[in-house]
Amino acid sequence: MTTRTLAAIALTTALGSLGFAQIGTPPAPVMAMMGGAGQPPMTGTGAMPGVAGMQMMHSMTDRTFLTMMIPHHQSAIQMSRAILKSTRDPQINTWATQIIADQQREITQMQGLLKEYGGPETGMTPGMLDMAGMVPAGPRSANPDVAYVQAMIPHHGMAVMMATHLLMQSTRPVMQNLARNIIAAQTNEIHAFQQYLNKVR
């Protein structure tokens, strides 16, 4: 898989999650790949049209998924550890604690699986890995608990989209099960987060 293919997967994943969550302006790493804030998207050989980007997503391999999902999980853990230092909301505490436990367990599993492929996907730059783990930008509440939930929804949405593509394409039962588990757990949490926001808005 080429560097351009990996970049397209990262970009399409990020943009897809932004659209899914309807959270406004893409974050700086995405804007940079698109030509910068206030600038037209890249053109020429580096351009990745939306349709082409989605086609690249359809070529995601098990190895690419693992390489990108590990930092994505790590960023969720960092967010959850941060909110645990300040929250007094029992529900937020429960969610953050569970996310840390579940995603750390999956990271350990994915690291073991990745060894079978000889390590992370070759040709993937630090910027691509940063994008895989980024938290999409957008309006956030001044209340840290609410802001955590608002950030976690699109973050989970990105994971669900990546896992759905993996589930459609992988031929390995262990990877299919991993994708199914991520989709099930994180869509349930997205729904719970939305119900929480319905009450506090």
Image: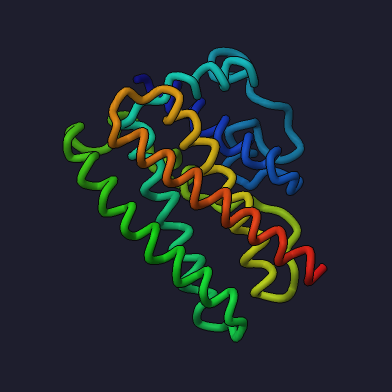
Residue 192 falls in image quadrant = bottom right
Query: Residue at coordinates 59% horizontally, 45% vertically from top-left?
Result: 157
The single residue placed furthest to the right in the displayed view is 201
Q: Seen in the image, is 145 located left or right of residue 141?
A: left
The quadrant of the image that shows the C terminus is bottom right
Q: Nearer the viewer, residue 121 or 69?
A: 69
Q: Seen in the image, is 129 located left or right of residue 160?
A: left
What colour scheme was applied to this rendering of the protein? rainbow
Q: Nearer the viewer, residue 128 or 102?
A: 102
How many numbered marks, from 0 up? 0
The answer to whether 15 is drawn above or below residue 25 in the figure is above
Query: Residue at coordinates 74% horizontally, 64% vertically from top-left?
Result: 197
Residue 114: x and y in percent read: 24, 39
Q: Seen in the image, is 200 located left or right of residue 120?
A: right
Residue 125: x and y in percent read: 38, 37
The answer to whether 88 is drawn above or below residue 134 in the figure is below
Q: Nearer the viewer, residue 36 or 181?
A: 181
The quadrant of the image that shows the N terminus is top left
Residue 200 falls in image quadrant = bottom right
Q: Nearer the viewer, residue 7 or 171?
A: 171
Query: Residue at coordinates 49% horizontally, 19% vertically from top-left?
Result: 56
Residue 95: x and y in percent read: 53, 69
Residue 158: x and y in percent read: 55, 43
Query: Residue at coordinates 58% horizontally, 15% vertically from top-left?
Result: 52
The answer to whether 38 is drawn above or below residue 21 in the figure is above
Q: Seen in the image, is 143 located left or right of residue 6?
A: right
